[in-house]
Amino acid sequence: MRRLRSSVALPILALGAALVAVPVASAQDSSATMRAEPPQNDLYPATLDFGTGLIDDPVAWVSPASGDVWVQTSAKHIPYNLVNQATLNTSAQWNTNLSIDSHWGGRYELGFSLYSQNPEWGFFGQALLNKEEQGKWWPAIAVGFRNLGPYPHEERMLVGHDVSIDSTGNGADITSPYARHFHSTPTLYGVATKSFAIGRTSDASLTLGYGDGLFSDDGGLGKSYNDKGTIAKGLFLGGRYAIHPTENTRLDFLAENNGWDWNAGVVGTWRGISLGIYGTELEEGSKSPTKGTFYSVYNYTKVNLSLGYSGNLYDIGRGAMLRSRVGELQREETRLHLELAKREERITALDDQLRKAQAGELAEVAKRRQTLESEIQAERDAIQKAEDRLKALQQGDQKPPVKPPQSPPAAPDSTKPPAR
């Protein structure tokens, strides 16, 4: 069993005691007030390399929402070119990782990870054998695997395989000489996690597990691979304390031992977008040639960064469908607006035609009415004259009726020749 430096051990022990004391105190308070709330089923952040968990350690937890996914990229400062470090630029000194993790049925996790820029890759996953239950003391238990792929000699930094470039510029995958004795495909583990609700806006959890491969195989390098930090071979443990400053914001404070080193960090999450900063190998201190042949890779404190996104495939799919539907509705709305504008123009034109037609019809009707009224009046006058004559006859008037004056004869046409 390797021992930590006292200057590092005290803060880590204090953090561990706090992680234990806070849930215990909370449990006592909740039992005193007879609170029946279950632990918050809060989402865990993605680890640096393999799915959800702490910093490097897995946890016995699978999201209850089927289809939840985590996409994350992380970077660890490791100038691991042992031949000529002077040739490395800033970007080459950061080993980057990309991982995609998915959870299904509340029991199963499956993911894929790219380990570095070379790139190497592997699958990971786990199955939740036992879920936590409200009011029960036993923890959640899960078994899982990591580094399932064609790269059997990966070590804990995931830089065991490299690319060799020949004089013609062609590259070939190679196994670094110092990593040939690692056997980490696949890495298997078992883990138990117990969570505790703390009030309404925070929760904490403790995790304990054991694994082979990446958790325990030192490739025969001994202290050059890991000088200090191991509690027991293959044993890993850690804790998390999560708070919600706002409804859409979460802060995760993480501390762990991944079987080799002590790590700590914080992850901030807002609406599924997460940003994390971590310190790993905190017990080792600064880099020094006195720490072994591979001092540029192992046995010194490293800075790690992560950027990720978490969401649900079904929600994303529904959102994409809704966005597509919204687009269709917007296009239909635009088409209807154009159609309405054209129909309004048509209505205006028809109104003009109608007004003109009505004006013309009214003039024609008025003229026809005047003609009819004149004819009716003439008929009435004739009827009145006939009635007057009939009345005169009945009274014995024998005078002949007054003939209406005849029209004068038409003037002869001077253009015609006289008759012979």
Image (tube, grey):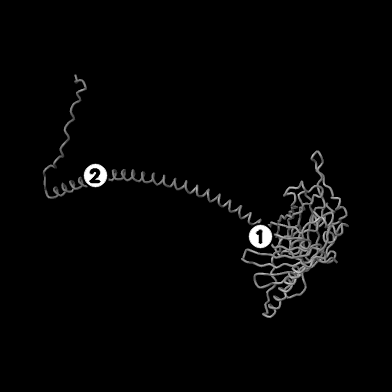
Q: Is 76 in front, or is 103?
A: 76
- For image coordinates 18% across by 30% down, the residue present is 410
Residue 203 in view: yes
- Label number found at residue 92: none
Q: Which residue lies under the disc numbered 2?
A: 374
The mark lying in front, picked from 2 and 1, is 1
Within the image, what quadrant is residue 170 found in? Answer: top right
Quadrant of the image containing the C terminus: top left
Q: Earlier in the sequence, mark 2 or mark 1?
A: 1
Residue 20 lies, in percent from the top left, at 74, 72
Q: Tell me the SS state at disc 1.
A: loop
What kind of residue is marked 1? Gly
The single residue placed furthest to the top in the displayed view is 420
The single residue placed furthest to the bottom in the displayed view is 32
Q: Is 200 in front, or is 334?
A: 200
Q: Which residue lies under the disc numbered 1?
A: 272
Residue 149 lies, in percent from the top left, at 82, 53
Quadrant of the image containing the N terminus: bottom right
Q: Is residue 102 above or below residue 136?
A: above
Separation of disc 2 and disc 1 at Cα?
92 Å
Within the image, what quadrant is residue 74 found in? Answer: bottom right
Q: Is residue 165 above or below residue 311?
A: above
Q: Is residue 125 above or below residue 38?
A: above
Q: Is 330 in front, or is 221?
A: 221
